[in-house]
Amino acid sequence: MTIAIGTELPELTIEATPTFVISTALATRDFQDVHHDRDAAISRGSKDIFVNILTDTGLVQRFVTDWAGPEALVRSIRIRLGVPCYAYDVLTFTGHVTEIDGDDAEIAVTAKGSLGDHVTGTVRVTLPGAGS
Amino acid sequence: MIDVEEAARRIAAKGESKPRLARDPVNQAMVNNWVEALGDANPVYTDPEFAKNSVHGGLVAPPAMAQVWSMAGLHGARAADDPLGAMMSILDEAGYTSVVATNSEQTYHRYLRPGEHVSSSIRLEDVTGPKRTALGEGWFVTTRTIWRVGEEAVAEMVFRVLKFSPSARRETVPDTGAVLRPVVSRDTEFFWEGTRKGELRIQRWGGVLRHPPGPMPPDGDLTAEADYVVAEGTGTVYSYLVHHHPQVPGKKTPFVVALVELAEGVRVLGELVDADPESVYIGLPVEVTFLRVDDELTLPAWKVRA
């Protein structure tokens, strides 16, 4: 694939339904009650159950490899956590290429929900053939 | 008094926790659960034929699952020598009882294959504070987790949490005398004199109204002289914002600040009082009200027109 600095990734929209929040929390083996028990989440001061961090990292990875393809090698995922993503919110992932060094590229990623930036971060990937 | 920095040095000096073996080796069933839940359709995780012909030469696990393999599970507890647990206890004792994660930075040295069994070790990298944050006063605690297969490091994670004191966030009763006071100049004196008398005065240069008032008319005519009109005091919300943070002296957050377009045509800023932020909209009819602070200062504000 040909990429350049500034190349935008196709948007990814994730509907964070309660089923999504719970099934991803369990699939990442995160059994903290705030990710599957609304009463517990509310009693701890949250509005509802919310998406866990391991899922954020996974979604950022998916967002980048959906675009980069199965041959891309993910080298690192660095995320900064912003506002929570509560059940029933919708996350929109956007990103663009910020750096290219041979076959390696850095992508800046933002996942925005109704409350603002949920996650911002960078992903480093190796894209076989990108530098040639 | 607990010396947090001293405790941090002591915990950091112990180095890495003993490697803890994951419950299960990397396995297809957990990978399948993960890709199904997250909606990741990358075939290198699930399609043996595709994976065989790919850059990997066989099935691999999603790199972002690194941490999943070593999660403690439903009834899990931290290891006794886990430095993050030890640091959390120290900060709990020091009164910093709440925690929020701020950063996760994972580096993958290579992809993992089904059958490989990872262990994890954690070390304390850094403790910084006390810092004043939006959530309250707290300490940033940074740890590094290293996942290994045998002796080989396969992935690492720098993880940062803010351990904070929610008491510092306790809502204080607003002292309404402690408002931010406007700077009154020769150009704006008439305006503040008006608010003291319950008049919303708008500067007039001949036939042109100007607000906020300034030293000259919009056309820059230096010989012009200004007077003012007293506005009727009704208008509609032209734009508004809901202020949540930072705290403002004399105000209880959240509150609404509205730019109101007056019947006379100029726009005037002010707080929209007694309004539920959810119910405010552009075009909302409002009227002026005056908030007396003291003998010197009365602030103009808005209230919803009945």
Image (cartoon, helix red, strand yellow):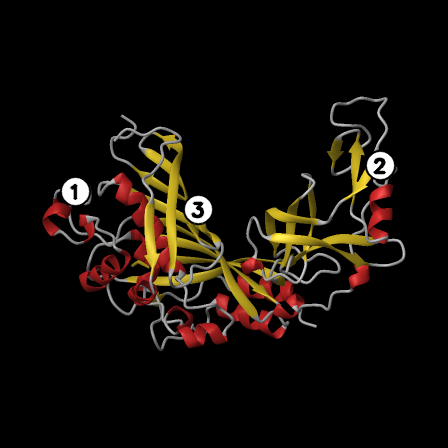
> Gap in Å between the C-alphas at discs 3 and 1?
28 Å
Q: Tag 3, which secondary structure?
A: strand
Q: Is residue B147 visible?
A: no
Q: Tag 2, which secondary structure?
A: loop
User: What's the mark number on residue B123?
Assistant: none
Q: Tag 1, which secondary structure?
A: loop
User: What's the mark number on residue A121?
Assistant: 3
Name the residue carrying label 1: B54
> Gap in Å between the C-alphas at discs 2 and 3?
48 Å
Three-letter code for the amino acid on which mark 1 is drawn: Ser
Question: Where does residue A31 sit, x and y in percent of width and height?
Answer: 36, 71
Chain containing mark 2: B
Question: Where does residue B104 sit, x and y in percent of width and height?
Answer: 44, 54
User: What's the mark number on residue B187?
Assistant: 2
Left or right relative to A75: residue B96: right
Residue at the far right: name it. Answer: B295
